Amino acid sequence: MLLASTATSTLFATASRGRSQAVASPGSDARQDKNQDTPKRPLAALKTRFACNVEMWYRKLPFLDRIKAAHEAGFPAIELWPWRNKPLDAIADLTGELGIEVAQFTAWGFVPGMNDPKNHDRFVEEIEASCETAKKLRCRKMTIVAGNDQKGMTQQEMHEHVITACKRAAPICEKHEVMMILEPMNIRVDHKGHCLYGSVDAVRICREVASPMCKINWDLYHMQISEGDLCGRLKDGFDQLGYLQLADHPGRREPGTGEIYYPRVLRQAYELGYHDFVGCECNPSEETIAVQRLVAAATF
């Protein structure tokens, strides 16, 4: 990956002291890029390694062109949602050619829920297939989702079924050295009726599974809405952290547009020992260098 320009280095320095005027709120002079000496790849050389979610960024482009756009912006990695119906060979070839990684993808979504034991056989089969996909994409992690509420079941019962499902699938992931990352959602804004939200239950589930290949997809946007205290919760559950994602709140936009002070949160994660990719699973308010600079300012 190319080194960032002097302008990016200056941005990196100011980010550790807080949001500077150079990365102020949307609509500020920071978005007037004409006639400015702005870096063309502002995300290329930062301590925090961001992964671009190509399902949410560059949506107007064909799928493979989104990967190219992410690379041009300086993202060292991408992430995607379900792998089925995706051009896997083309993705593998393009990411290899560009030298960009696939940080993670979705192996198992909301439905059918793995919180229902009748779906466990299918879940295990899909984890096996997803591990093969991970090998093809040279990917080390894959998201799994617990499922929406099941009629007639308590939350505790559903969580126990999730533990059972993950225990069945864990040996497959260990054999392939691909990590399942269980994602808690939020039920206040985006996923009402989902059975798993906040870090406490997710940490308990993964500790019960007790596998190095079953950890948490710790989406800081969902965690902010569900429980807050992002730094404290990260510290409490760090042994079960598998992957980080971010978006600001409210709005699920890029960092710097809402209430979360990401330089502090990401510094906490880094100091605890998390040095892997941070997924930008957010809806960018624009797709310009100015927005990339706001993401860059989320580092520390």
Image: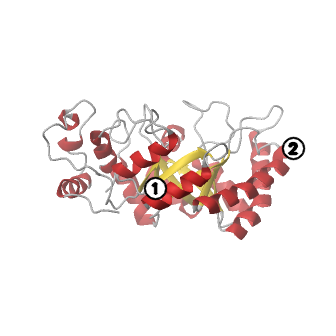
User: Residue 199: image x %, image y %?
Assistant: 58, 49
Query: Which label belongs to residue 268?
Result: none
Q: Nearer the viewer, mark 2 or mark 1?
A: 1
Please tell me how crowded label 2 is: few (under 14), some (14-19), or many (20+) other residues with Cα within 10 Å: few
User: Residue 162: image x %, image y %?
Assistant: 75, 50
User: Residue 208: image x %, image y %?
Assistant: 72, 60
Q: Which residue is mark 2?
A: 118
Q: Which residue is outermost to the right?
A: 118
Is residue 298 visible in the rendered image? The answer is no
Of the 4 image quadrants, the one containing the C terminus is bottom left
Q: Nearer the viewer, residue 101 or 197?
A: 101
Query: Which label belongs to residue 77?
Result: 1
Locate residue 113 relative to residue 5 in the image: left or right: right
Coloring applied to the structure? secondary structure
Locate residue 279 relative to residue 258 in the image: left or right: right
Residue ID at (43%, 38%): 58
